[in-house]
Amino acid sequence: MSLPYANATSGRTAMDDIRKSIQAFGCSKFAPMEDFSAGTVSIQFEYRSRMVQVTASAKGYAAAWLRENPYSSRMRLSKTEHEKRALEKGQVAVWSILRDWIKGQLTAIETGILDFEGAFLGQILLPTGETIHERIMSQGLLPAPEKGSSNE
């Protein structure tokens, strides 16, 4: 199986799609942000006075792409160029991933599968500026995953 979004090309167009989707849903604020040093993309929006922040890692995607497409000396580019290419793919892919995930969550809300809090609970921003997910993890409120789980 190939890595999903490996051939994504929409990049910034996906950001515009996100803005349109959340605006149509009734959100009152929207702010995209890129952290170049961390290699992340974040989308913030507000819905009924609930601030939400969703973040995706281009570096994380690049690492996954490199696992699936390891460097070989037979390639026509250097290892550094190959890694740069992976990061560029990640920078495009994360916008599409966020677009599809947010659109899926909004669709789940609109169709009654989830309520807003259920769909975005981990990404709701607390007054401290951290997300609920970050607070839960920092306080150790969830038990550690079992050894041998499918996420390892």
Image: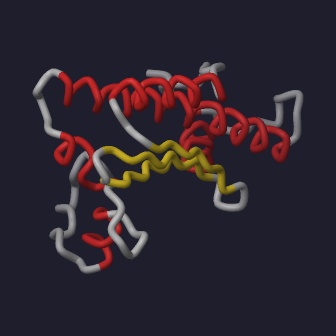
* Image vertical order of residue 77 relative to residue 43, above or below: above
* Nearer to me, 61 or 50: 50
| Rendered image quadrant of residue 1 | top left
* Nearer to me, 11 or 33: 33
**Could one spot residue 152 in this view of the protein?**
yes
In the rendered image, residue 4, in percent from the top left (x then y), is placed at 48, 25
In the rendered image, residue 99, in percent from the top left (x then y), is placed at 47, 29
Q: How many marks?
A: 0
**Residue at image location 48% in from the left, 24% down from the top:** 20
Colour setting = secondary structure
* Nearer to me, 19 or 90: 19
**Residue at image location 58% in from the left, 31% down from the top:** 15
**Residue at image location 39% in from the left, 69% down from the top:** 130
Q: Residue furthest left?
A: 112
Q: Residue furthest bottom?
A: 139
| Rendered image quadrant of residue 61 | top right
In the rendered image, residue 83, in percent from the top left (x then y), is placed at 75, 44
**Could one spot residue 63 in this view of the protein?**
no
* Image vertical order of residue 127 relative to residue 56, above or below: below
* Image vertical order of residue 21 relative to residue 91, above or below: above
In the rendered image, residue 100, in percent from the top left (x then y), is placed at 42, 26
Residue 127 placement, left or right of 41 = left
**Residue at image location 31% in from the left, 56% down from the top:** 124
Residue 112 placement, left or right of 10 = left
Residue 31 placement, left or right of 107 = right
